[in-house]
Image: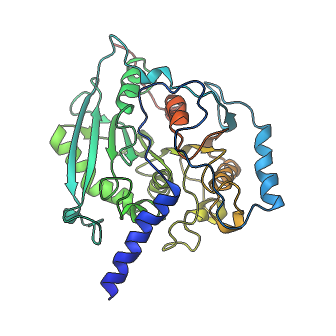
Amino acid sequence: MKQFKMKIINLIRGVTPLCLAFGAIPVFSQTAAPATNAVSAGAPSGQQRGAPMSDTDKAEIAKLADLPEWKPGDGDGDYFIAPPYAAAPEQTPKEGVPKGRVESFSMNEADSKFFTGEGMRGATPTRKVVVYIPSQYVPGTPAPLIVTADTYGERSLPTILDNMIAAHRLPAIIAVMIANGGGDSRGSERGLEYDSVNGKNAEFIEAEVLPKVEKDYGVTLTRDGAARMALGGSSGGSSAFTMAWFHPELYQRVITYSGTYVNQNHDDYPQGAWAYHESLIPHSPAKPLRVWLEVGERDNGAGSASSGLHNWVIANIRMARVLKAKGYHYQFIYAKGAGHTDGHVISQTLPQALEYVWKGYSIAPAK
């Protein structure tokens, strides 16, 4: 009976919040978004969850109208962007730019000591891992690293990195794009892996994923947290922040789109990831993190009372507020007219977001 109960709990964690909150995973299409489109097709419309916003909640969101517009090269602070959204030029392959190597492999959940896939659909649950190795990588040299949740960036991150590394706007970064347990957006272990407010996912990646990448592809990954970044959207976004929060020695640069800083999984803290802006960040010494975060005007839970702990817009506003109060380097982007993990917004902003979070990192000059 206990085992059956745990299977049901895992199913609810992974599937129910995901179906409500995440929708399809955007994979950064290399096709430019039409300039007339404000939001992705099928993006959630900020459906209300529970009681409507209070007057205090409305006043909190109303302050976003006073934000300055985000521009290239902007420093720390809060900004807005607005439609029409269009894919950044860095997403287009350029003639003469060296192309990196892209590899992929699968991992059997049953072989893991961290996330076994117990109770998931299918006899042998697997997770996909995609690896990008830039042409400029020198074997034996510890390389900077990006780890993404949900294989974020599988289709376009390699091209973005090709262009930005060649232009010396980024170092020669290796990217490891890791799917959630189950291999798709509805894997029943996703909520357990991403919404849990603890260091387990970072520890899993460090112990089981990255050593395989190094061994199979002949690369060396740096262990310096200042040369490592985590990226994700929705629950994958809050997971990226969680990896850095609990293991800043491993990850100090973070990008999150529509981060799920709400109460999705309260095993570790009664308020789940809402605890970050409610108590954890305000009441903890500042960590050496550099954070870029975005939320859409029509994001999940927009219109819902903050007391329900499921308004993504308010959660991200408060993340920005507490990061500022503690003196973190951060940028908060409010995307007008945009939905949850809006693909058009991601396509437009990712290169600048990468440039911001890697600011201060030494980039080797052209040879």
Question: Residue at (61%, 24%) from the top-left corner?
Answer: 72
Residue, x 54% and y 56% (percent of image)?
260
Rendered location of residue 116, percent (x, y): 26, 67
Q: Quadrant of residue 140?
A: top left
Viewer-nearest residue: 39 or 174:
39
Q: Residue at x 59, y 28 (%)?
A: 85
Q: Is residue 331 above or below residue 83?
A: below
Tell me what residue is drawn at x 51 percent, y 24 percent.
88
In the rendered image, the vertical position of residue 186 relative to residue 252, given as above or below: below
Residue 70: image x %, image y %?
A: 66, 30
The quadrant where residue 194 appears: bottom left
Answer yes or no: is residue 198 visible. Answer: no
Depth check: give the residue in front, 70 or 335: 335
Q: Is residue 37 above or below residue 8?
A: above
Say left or right for 337 vs 33: right
Q: Is residue 118 above or below residue 124?
A: below
Measured as percent of width and height from the top left, residue 332 is found at 64, 42
Q: Quadrant of the C terminus?
A: top left
Judged from this view, the residue extending furthest toward the front is 42
Residue 58 lies in quadrant: bottom right
Judged left or right of residue 59, residue 155 is: left
Residue 309 visible in the picture = yes
Q: Position of residue 294 (x, y in %)?
A: 59, 43
| Front residue (pair 262, 119) | 119
Q: With 222 as the anchor, is 360 left or right in this view?
A: right
- Count of marks placed on residues: 0
Which residue ends up furthest to the top in the rendered image?
A: 96
